[in-house]
Image: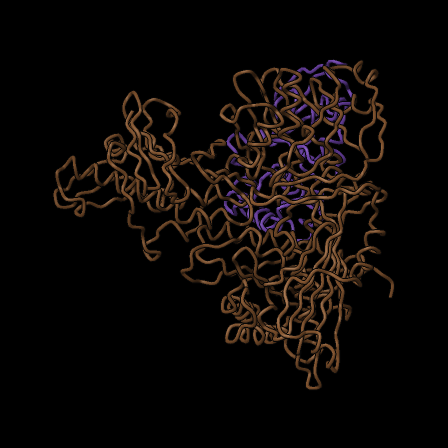
Chain colours: A purple, B brown
Amino acid sequence: MAKMNLKVNHKTYSVDVDPATPLLWVLRDHLHLVGTKFGCAVGACGACTVHMNGMAMKSCQLPVSAAATQEITTIEGLSENGDHPVQKAWLDIDVAQCGYCQTGQIMAAAALLKQKPNPTDADIDNFMSGNICRCGTYVRIREAIHSAANMSKK
Amino acid sequence: MENKTSRRSFLKVSSISGGGMLLGFSWLASLKPTEVMGAATGAKDWVELTGFIKILPDNQIKILSPNPEFGQNVMTSLPMLIAEELEVDWKKITVEMGDYDTPRFKSQFTGGSQSIRSAWGPLRKAGATAKWMLLQAAANQWNVPVAELTASNGTVIHKASNRTSTYGALAEAASKLPVPSNPVLKKSSEHNLVGKPQKNVEGPKIVAGKSLFTMDYQVEGMLIAMAIHPPAFGMQLKSFDATEAKKMPGIKDVFDIEVYKKGYERAGFDTRTFNHLIVVVGNSTWEVINARKKVVAQWEPIVETKEMVTNFGRRKEETIIPAGLESSDKHMQKMLELQGQKARVLRKDGDPEAAFATAKKVIEKTYSAPFLPHNTMEPISCFAHITDEKAFFVAPIQIPDMMKQNIVANLDVPADKIEMKLARMGGGFGRRAYGHYIIEAGLISKKMKAPVKLIYTREDDMTNGVYRPAYIVTYKAALDANNNIIAIHIKGGGIPEHAVHENRFPAGAFDNYLAEGWELPSNITIGAFRAPRSNFIASAEQSFLDELAHAIGKDPIDFRIELLKKAKSSPVGKNNEYDAARYIGVLELVKEKSKWTATPKGTHRGVAAYFCHNSYAAHVVDVSMKSGQPVIEQVVSVLDCGIVVNPDAAKNMVEGAVVDGIGNSLFGGLKFDKGVVTQQNLNQYRMIRMKEAPKKIDVHFVQNNIDPTGLGEPPFPPIFAALANALYKATGKRFYHQPFINELNKKA
């Protein structure tokens, strides 16, 4: 066990956990930030995607010790009121079916738009292929990312 | 307490202490009076109109959605049915998921594409009944005939005297009135909500990452539990040593549980499970994951058993669970061998043997598909807290009431002490009809005397699954000298069930027809998977018809329509399940919408259509080939599911089915090696991803006034064959064995 400070959504949390604990479980079990989802724990599905210093990161693959002192953003901190352009686009297009993967999809999409404000379909396909949606909402996700990109331009 | 239950009404009313009334809702128009409702829930100033509708004095209206939600959007579409008839402003309504309360909701069933179909009458009637009572209450108050009143936006209006009153103000008086037995429902031309797209009521919570799923549920003092099941099907626990595991940090206990008691007679959706499990319980997920690795277990082979299973209370069946360690390659050998042996006749029309004997040419093709894991994005989980007062669960479960007798029998909890919150499910697809995990979580909570959340890792979820069975089928057609098809023979088998739907198309279109089936018992657990059996048989049948059309030089759509016209005008046999006219309808519309004869340059198209779950679906798939791999350029989908309640959500469902079907037909397949699942996580098992998804999906619904039929499943089965037929055009190769990617990458 080790005491460490975590910066999550601009707040500092002090946790006392095994330093090897994946950030995913610290977020969910210790900080009660359950918007970051558990899907596979091997970095293959993207349900656990968060931002570390603005970059998309699979939190199941990140030991908490490596996340300490970094700027972590989870879905709960993406926007104050759930109104980040990507979240708004997701609601406009009504993307979700079961919804379980969508927070990971939204975090990945927000990171993509930070890097590429005007992504092409191919950019989206490449960047988003680390996130699985079992319900098959991919066509809507693509549309929503374009819509969020347009929203941000205005 | 006064009970004004009318024998003929499907709503019942009873007064409650503290004023107001409670109206209970009976899902089916049962002739038997149901028992009086329990005490009202919620704040004192709520007036509960039926089990589904609450109206606040300030005219806020809350509708409880009865059916479990796993992404088919019934939490939006079911309340729409009530709101349509109740005449309330949809934007002012709040919708909540109802808890498990089947005595009140009667049918809390999500599965079989039945939600909208079975709710269409009752929920509209519930809304209409409440509206009628509110109108009557206003009529009494103002002393005017009810016919002079109108209802709109949660308000009763008397135009002649310019008086209005909100539902909130009338609710208490309304609830004291007798329940009308047959309120008049609106005509579909009068609908102003049904048929207009409404957004997912839980959308804002989903995109904000709010706690909605069982996996997210947490309470003070909650423990985390994980189970260890045998490493292979055909094995069971012999003994284990938990000394080291118990010493690990944060660990509370390690013990074993028997899920179902000895002699427990399984019913309906009680899947056979790995019944004897080791359980590790601790403070946090990571600690339990680590301690679990320290458990040393010995396993031993199972012996063959026979057990009686009650099939939905209707009949008892003996099930054989064979011993042995099964492997996929042996399965295939065995299935091919059994295809050559005698099978059970499921249906016979005319004299197929004679027709085949005189045939000039016989076309015979065999199709197969492997086991499939559901791989819901949310792995299996369940929260349980069993105390002397009650058994409380937060459960992702498609059919909660099916679990009642199981909970009573295996957790020794009286039925009236079961409380269950129905969490939003991170995908279902049939997997969450099988609630063995509810019993597992309950047993662990009982032993720990604490609130417990049971979590399956992805490996647990994939290796302790309730898989889609493995199937095989051979289609045979007899042709005469003029290329007329004079007989059809379908013979199918599977592990442990066959997928032949003997009374579906093309039955009815051929004078000589034979359908046969056989089963091979297995110790691998299987269950419902989106459009059970249909999801395989459609892929074979629709590929075969395509090949037949090609062989006799006919356009594949025209060929199907021709057969369906025959089945419509002079159907062969008695039990044909489908409506040939609606079948023709989807084919004609998909032909028009896809501009069938104008294949876009550089692409190759395939078509397929199917009927299941009371609905009709057809797809045209366009593929192009890039570096030998298919790119899905476009899918045009046509559905006839009757009236569409929430069109945009319905489109989403069809799009999802298309993607799901393309993914499973191209990549899906779970393999077994001596009982061991060989792909245990998503880095070893290929699922469709964004870059493989179609570039465009164009969905159309047949416009008609038929009461809604199924939607979640029907668009799924025909996509497999539409893709196979497009791939044939693209490659010149027919695709008989799933997953197609293996066939595609096979060196010629």
Query: Given the current orientation, which residue lies at the most extreme right position?
Result: B747
Query: Given the current orientation, which residue lies at the most extreme bottom position?
Result: B482
Where does residue B518 sit, x and y in percent of width and height?
72, 57
Please name whichever residue, A68 or B27, is drawn nearer the observer in this view of the structure. Answer: B27
Where does residue B685 sit, x and y in percent of width and height?
77, 45
Horizontally, residue B200 falls left or right of residue B747, namely: left
Up-down relation of residue B628 to residue B153 (above or below): below
Which residue is at a point 20% across and 42% down the rendered structure image? B157
The answer to which image quadrant residue A87 occupies is: top right
Horizontally, residue B408 falls left or right of residue A128, namely: left
Image quadrant for the C terminus of chain B? bottom right
Where does residue A76 sit, x and y in percent of width and height?
58, 29
The answer to which image quadrant residue B320 occupies is: top right
Horizontally, residue A141 falls left or right of residue A5, namely: left
Please name whichever residue, A106 or B609, is drawn nearer the observer in this view of the structure. Answer: B609
Which residue is at a point 52% across and 68% down the rendered structure image? B580
The answer to which image quadrant residue A72 occupies is: top right
Where does residue B605 sit, x and y in percent of width and height?
66, 68
- Residue B433 at least partly seen: no
Which residue is at a point 57% across and 76% down the rendered structure image? B562
Image quadrant for the N terminus of chain B? top left
- Residue B399 at least partly seen: yes
Up-down relation of residue B299 to residue B81 (above or below): above
Number of marks drawn: 0
